[in-house]
Image (cartoon, grey):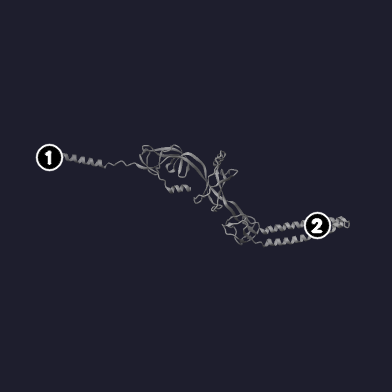
């Protein structure tokens, strides 16, 4: 009986202890610290580049302009191909101008005959005048006739030369060695020497190309100050429309003499060697200019910086692996990085948190940050 009472008394206690033990086992454990990719802040000399939109021009771009009217009867080149100086490019129907040449040649022959007659007449009268066999009036008339014949002969000779020049304009030749563009006229077109119809084509000399781009007034003033202290801009790169770089470095040619008051910009021209002829006149691209070199600059990836209402912040990992939010001041961007002008020191650890939910003061497990190669390539193109 005593044993039965004892078992009834102990049973509730046993059940309570069992439930208590079960509750203790089911309590959730604290989650492990999240991993936080980080970079170590470095101090290095950073070249600062700036890109400017530009357009290419040939070293020489010479328009072929018709100087006579007529039907286009010949095109003697392939568009987009190289041409030589003096090479025949276009022919305009010369019949009208050949006829004019022949007409003036006839006038020259008549004028020459008149000159010979006048000269012979003067030769005959002059000795007679010396002997007073003829009057002085007859001598003066012979002299005047000879002068008139000479003047007329010179005039028609000049007219013949002019007509021959116009006849020569029917054959349009290349003024330089270069590359010819697309023709603005086709066989059978009537060409005039006035208006846009006279512009037949363009021949470009492309051993070197000129690239014109505009810079702001502030950038131009900065360039002038650098020039005065002897820091000339010598590193110019041309980025093509597909993002590739032209292999040859460029040099500055000149800057415009005035600032455009409507845009507040200055036009600058650079020149790039083009030995393989890959660049053509009229292309668009970007001129990348080395503005300056930041000495001992603090540099971190752009992904490590967040902006909130005009404030720039980074997440610093302290010695206890805790996250500390810090406000910084930023400078220029360079590639995938950002120059930090204030708020960070070399060798500090900066977390690349991204979209991870990590609160300030959280303990993290630092892991080295590995940048995405695709992102690097994309940034270099831009």
Q: Is residue 97 left or right of residue 372?
A: right
Secondary structure at badge 2 equals helix
Residue 355 in percent (x, y) is at 39, 44
Label 1 and label 2: CA atoms lie apart by 169 Å
Residue beneath the point at 79% across and 56% down:
148
User: Outermost residue, left direction?
Assistant: 1
Please determine whether, in this image, residue 166 is positioned above or below residue 358.
Answer: below
Camera-side residue of 231 and 90: 231
Q: Which residue is mark 2?
A: 146
Residue beneath the point at 75% across and 56% down:
154
Camera-side residue of 357 and 284: 284
> For mark 2, does the 10 Å Cα neighbourhood hold few (<14), some (14 to 19), or many (20 or more) residues?
many
Precedes in sequence: disc 1 or disc 2: 1
Residue 214: quadrant of the picture: top right
Residue 333 in percent (x, y) is at 47, 42
> For mark 1, does the 10 Å Cα neighbourhood hold few (<14), some (14 to 19), or many (20 or more) residues?
few
Q: Is residue 382 left or right of residue 68?
A: left
Residue beneath the point at 82% across and 56% down:
143
Residue 24: quadrant of the picture: top left
Residue 223 in percent (x, y) is at 55, 41
Q: Is residue 85 left or right of residue 382?
A: right
Query: Would you say the residues marked 1 and 2 are in contact, meaning their CB atoms lie under 8 Å apart?
Result: no
Q: Which residue is mark 1?
A: 3
User: Outermost residue, right direction?
Assistant: 132
Camera-side residue of 112 and 316: 112
Residue 301 in percent (x, y) is at 43, 43
């Amino acid at each position: 009986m005593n044993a039965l009472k004892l078992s009834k008394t102990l049973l509730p206690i046993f059940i309570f202890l069992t439930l208590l033990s079960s509750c203790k086992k089911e309590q959730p454990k604290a989650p492990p610290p999240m991993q936080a990719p980080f970079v170590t802040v470095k101090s290095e000399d950073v070249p600062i580049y700036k890109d400017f939109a530009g357009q290419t021009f040939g070293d020489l771009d010479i328009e072929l302009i018709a100087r006579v009217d007529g039907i286009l009867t010949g095109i003697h080149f392939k568009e987009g191909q190289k041409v030589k100086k003096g090479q025949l490019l276009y022919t305009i129907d010369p019949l009208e101008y050949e006829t004019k040449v022949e007409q003036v040649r006839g006038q020259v022959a008549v004028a020459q005959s008149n000159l010979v007659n006048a000269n012979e007449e003067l030769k005959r009268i002059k000795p007679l005048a010396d002997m007073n066999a003829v009057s002085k009036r007859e001598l003066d008339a012979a002299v005047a006739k000879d002068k008139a014949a000479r003047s007329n002969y010179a005039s028609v000779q000049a007219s013949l030369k002019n007509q021959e020049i116009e006849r020569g304009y029917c054959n349009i030749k290349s003024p330089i060695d270069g590359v010819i563009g697309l023709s603005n006229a086709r066989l059978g077109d009537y060409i005039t020497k006035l208006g846009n119809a006279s512009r037949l084509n363009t021949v470009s000399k492309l051993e070197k190309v000129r690239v014109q781009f505009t810079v702001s007034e502030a950038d131009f003033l900065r360039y002038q100050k650098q020039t005065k202290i002897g820091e000339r801009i010598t590193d110019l790169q041309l980025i093509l429309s597909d993002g590739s770089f032209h292999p040859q470095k460029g040099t500055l040619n000149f800057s415009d003499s005035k600032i455009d008051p409507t845009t507040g910009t200055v036009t600058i021209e650079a020149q790039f060697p083009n030995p393989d002829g890959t660049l053509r006149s009229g292309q668009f691209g970007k001129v990348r200019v080395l503005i300056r070199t930041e000495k001992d600059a603090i540099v971190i990836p752009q992904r490590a910086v967040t902006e909130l209402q005009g404030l720039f912040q980074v997440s610093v990992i302290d010695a206890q692996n805790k996250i500390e939010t810090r406000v910084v001041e930023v400078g220029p961007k360079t590639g995938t990085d950002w120059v930090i002008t204030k708020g960070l020191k070399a060798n500090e650890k900066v977390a690349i948190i991204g979209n991870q939910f990590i609160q300030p003061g959280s303990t993290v497990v630092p892991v080295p940050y590995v940048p995405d190669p695709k992102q690097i390539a994309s940034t270099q193109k831009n």
